Image: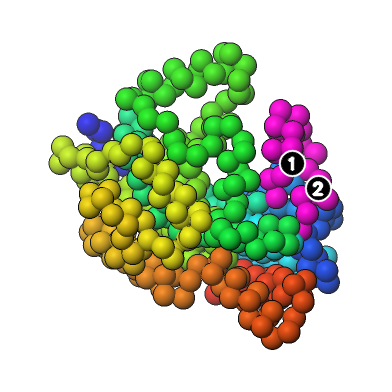
Amino acid sequence: MSPREPSFTIGVEEEYLLVDRRSRNLVSEPPAALIEECAALSPAGRVSPEFLQAQIEVGTTVCNSLDEVRNDLAHLRRTVAAVSGKHGLAPIAASTHPFALWREQKHTDKERYRILNRDMQAAARRLMIGGMHVHVGIEDDDLRIDILNQAAYFLPHLLALSTSSPFWEGTETGLHSYRLCVFDELPRTGLPERFESYGEYKRTVDLMVAAGLLEDATKLWWDVRPSARFPTIEMRITDVCTQVEDALCCAAVFRCLCRMLYRLRRQNQRWRIYAPLLVHENRWRAQRYGLDEGMVDFGRGEIVPFTALTRELLGILREDAEHFGCVREVEHALTIIERGASSHRQLRTYREALRSGATEREALLEVVDRLIERTVEGCGESG
């Protein structure tokens, strides 16, 4: 048993795509000074390049409340929008661009990315995607592994709330999270492995490093993982949320899930661990249908509407949401279900434009315009 309650601190990382305001296409070579200009207006290390030059990553500080996360994310989105705007660019918080072509993108000239490009070849070069990662502070190593094993069950629910990648290279894919199709081409992705202890996890990683399979545990790209850099559990399955309030909801739900699982452990209970085959089915349903077609309730053995599953989950997490003072953020999940996630709103914009007589290209341009607006919506003035 963990000797003391975890801190449950929280931090959020988001990856944005940079578009040219005139063409609305991705900018394959943004100004070299852009990252430095953004970093100068934010705390050290909070803004950084990503694998592709058209990507930019931001990260909050270590936060104790959702209000702190909100303030950090709003500042970071506002800063990136203001700085990129001076160069005729804009960030979009969407996990794929509606029509950009991956073959036209260039990767960042950085040792880590050169190695990734060399080792993964086209699987890496297609990574024209962005995601959101949520870190929750759990200092005890074995507790972190125990929660990792149980948290996998809830990952499809979080994905469904966040979907923002229905298009790929100008095509309506029929999926709400096409991002995972791209990301899953890499090795060591998907649902996490199960481990009996932190010791078993560490021995496994050490073996892979010794065999030359990977440099370190940062190359484990599971949907949720023990962070290799911090004493946190890191949720990685979510698409990046276009609107900041949706991002806060997903972050709050994951934080509450971690505490709920800790509470069960403290009472000598645990969430039932189901076969990966079953959880994979719900993961696929979230990827394909988003919020629309429900998920399997394994206890009942039937598909249940996502609204019903969410209301049940919110009831389970109520004590934890009250503890963290984030009831409003957690219950925002019902708002997402009612008006749709970003993928739903992108598809609605696209289809309405087509019905109004727009060409496919014009409809996709309209989608980008709405993404630019919604990325900074609720973040204050973007300058």
Look at the numbered disc 1 and give the secondary structure of its residue: helix
Q: What distance separates the C-alpha of mark 2 from that of mark 1?
A: 8 Å
Q: Residue at x 51, y 56 (%)?
A: 288
How packed mark 1 is, by other alpha carbons closer than 10 Å (few <14, some 14-19, many 20 or more), is some
Residue 232 drawn at (x, y percent): 43, 40
How packed mark 2 is, by other alpha carbons closer than 10 Å (few <14, some 14-19, many 20 or more), is few
Q: Is residue 116 magenta?
A: yes
Residue with the mark numbered 2: 103
Q: Residue at x 60, y 51 (%)?
A: 179
Q: Is residue 173 above or below residue 51?
A: below
Residue 133 drawn at (x, y percent): 52, 49
Residue 178 drawn at (x, y percent): 59, 54
Q: Is residue 294 above or below residue 122?
A: below
Q: Give yes or no for contact between labels 2 and 1 (Cβ–Cβ under 8 Å).
A: yes
Numbered circle sitting on residue 275: none
Residue with the mark numbered 1: 125
